[in-house]
Amino acid sequence: MIKKIGGFGIAIENNCAIEFIDNKYFKVITSKPHAGAYKVYKKRGEIISEKIEQKAELSPIRELFLKGDCPLKIPFKNRITKRKK
């Protein structure tokens, strides 16, 4: 999909999850050492898959929207929304 239309995605392997806290922070959690999560985006016609670092502490969600050192251009006003019950 990203190859055709561009944009940004998060890929998560088996035995991995991303925990989101208060719409401000996140943490990559794995149950196997080889499992991981990745930012996937298109840059100059090439698909980039960048591993999201697994840290002991929480990270600000804005870090998910960085390509290397550059912010991603995300067209959505509110990137993460709470579901209404």
Image (tube, helix red, strand yellow):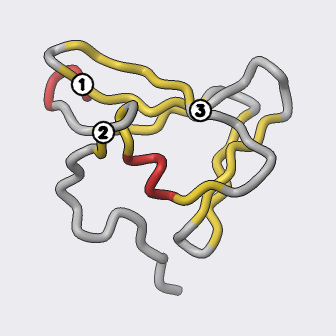
Q: Amino acid at mark 3?
A: Ala
Q: Quadrant of residue 47?
A: top left
Residue 73 sits above or below residue 26 on the image: above
Q: Residue furthest front?
A: 69
For disc 1, the marked residue is: 42
As shown in the figure, which amino acid type bears the numbered disc 1?
Answer: Lys
The amino acid type found where label 2 is placed reads Cys
Q: Residue at position x 23%, y 69% from top?
A: 77
Circles 3 and 1, Cβ within 8 Å, touching? The answer is no
Is label 3 in a helix, a strand or a loop? Answer: strand
Q: How far apart are labels 2 and 3 at the CA level?
A: 19 Å
User: Which residue position is annotated with label 3?
Assistant: 37
Q: Residue 72, image x and y in percent? A: 27, 44
Q: How many marks?
A: 3
| Residue 61 horizontal side relative to residue 27, left or right | left
Give the number of the mark in front: 2 or 3. Answer: 2
Q: How far, Cα to Cα, is label 3 from label 1?
A: 17 Å
Q: Secondary structure at mark 2?
A: strand
> Label 3 neighbourhood size at 10 Å, few (<14), some (14-19), many (20+)?
many
Of pointers 2 and 1, the one earlier in the residue sequence: 1
Residue at the outermost bottom position: 85
**Which residue, as the protein is rendered here, is positioned at the far top?**
46
**SS state under label 1:** strand
Instruction: Give the labeled residue for mark 2.
Output: 70
Residue at the image position 21 percent from the left and 47 percent from the top: 73
Mark 2 vs 3: CB contact within 8 A: no
